Image: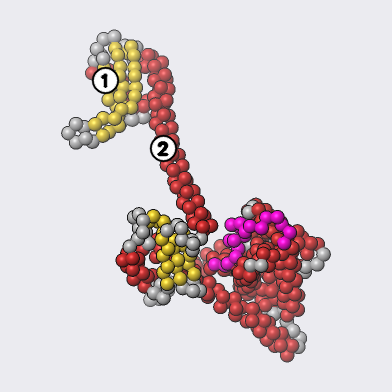
Amino acid sequence: MKTDPRNVHAIKKFISEYLDLRKDKEDEIKTVESIRKGVEFKGANLWILIFAVFMASLGLNVNSTAVIIGAMLISPLMGPIMGVGLSVGLNDFELMKRSLKSYLITTMFCVITATIYFLFTPIAEARSELLARTSPSIYDVFIALLGGMAGVVALSTKEKGNVIPGVAIATALMPPLCTAGYGLASGNLVYFLGAFYLYFINSVFISLATFIGIRVMHFKRKEFVDKKRESTVKKYIIIIAVVTMAPAIYLTFDIIKSTFYDSAANKFINEQLSFENAQVVDRKINYDEKEIRVVLLGEDVPEASLAIARDMMKNYQLGDTKLTVLQGINNNQVDMTSMRAMLMEDFYKNSEQRLQEQRTQISHLESELRRYKAYDEVNSSLIPEMKALFPEVTSVAVSRMVEISVETMKTDTIEVALLNFDKQPAKKELAKIDEWLKARLKTNHLRLIVE
């Protein structure tokens, strides 16, 4: 099938008009210089970072989202990370060395500062905001990649707007480092490694996004007079990039598998472990050990039913997974904290549902009340006009009623107008009144009753 050249031209024109990044592109030298400046971490920049870490740690400690967001906004952590991506894109080995050095220094300062804070804070309990930063997911990878792309595009345009602050919030580099500090302060290596893992993944993919953006926008690469040195520099850059990216890619692949496993496990629990007189109050999904553990509350589920559920696991790609079902709240293996959280979540959802139902009912009643009030107002406004147009009318009443068919039980809503006259009006006069009332009441379903 031959492609019409006109269609190709139209597509090219559309892309050049709407998607061409070069239209709003800032001077390339200014963009590169801006990223280079963000790489340096000395003096004021380092003190700002330290204060931001204290703020973020305090926000995680007291579970304040607003404080955490504020700390991310003032944190200058993005500079060295984007500098690494820029250096790879431009073949600038000196910039790469400076960026990696600043990256290591800032990371060290952040972790030490957070550790010091959490060693002396009186609140030692891990809150939800802190626990949310103890392990990465596939969504964190996508956020880092897309955020990094948005950041490099914004830096390379004349109108930068509020993109950079938004990227700083979305990619969330500061909270994982603070959580790593909490892990060291509390002696919890699982928290430390999980949070640092999240920070490393975010950093790598922001750098990758910067590199892709630099190449897509065709930034001019660094040129060397000595071609042999150029070849050596490229080789070093490639080696460092591969050494950095290889573990990130491997870990990301593991995150993807873990995400799919968690999704399949949750689907299995929701579909196959939903019993009439028993409820799942706690669930633990362990990807590394290939185990699903659930706690059921209510009547004991027969082993035959659990055997059927186990047999269904292969349909969810969980054939090699061990299913452990604990029945009874008194079992010492029950995670009471997790169960309380789940019960509170169910209570919150049920309360929200009841509130929503009540809001709907109140809204419906208010609507009905407005209708009745509207008829009172209509009656008041109709009387002067009717007195002028139809002086023979002595009284008028207008209301909405429900009419029910005796044979079919079918219901219909109609407007009823009750009129009193001094003397019986002619049919022509009644038809005239009927048309006038329909126009005034804005309805075609009017029942006129004359007394």
Magenta residues (range): 119-137
Kindly report the distance in space between the C-alpha atoms of the residues bearing marks 2 and 1: 33 Å
Corner quadrant of residue 169: bottom right
Using the image as rendered, state which of residue 412 and residue 272 is in the foreground: 272
Residue visible at 59% across and 57% down?
128
Magenta region, main secondary structure: loop
Is residue 99 shown to the viewer in this render? Answer: no
Residue marked by disc 1: 449
Q: Is residue 53 above or below residue 201?
A: above
Q: Which mark is residue 317?
A: none
Please identify the residue farthest to the top as the structure is shown.
422
Q: Please give the name of the residue rendered at 25% of the width and 19% of the height, measured from the top-left corner.
A: 428
Extreme right residue here?
43
Q: Is residue 290 magenta?
A: no
> What amino acid type should be assigned to the residue bearing mark 2?
Gln
Of the pair 74 and 306, the residue shown nearer to us: 306
- The colour scheme is secondary structure
Residue 372 shown left or right of residue 419 in the figure: right
Q: What residue sits 34% from the left and 19% below the top?
A: 397
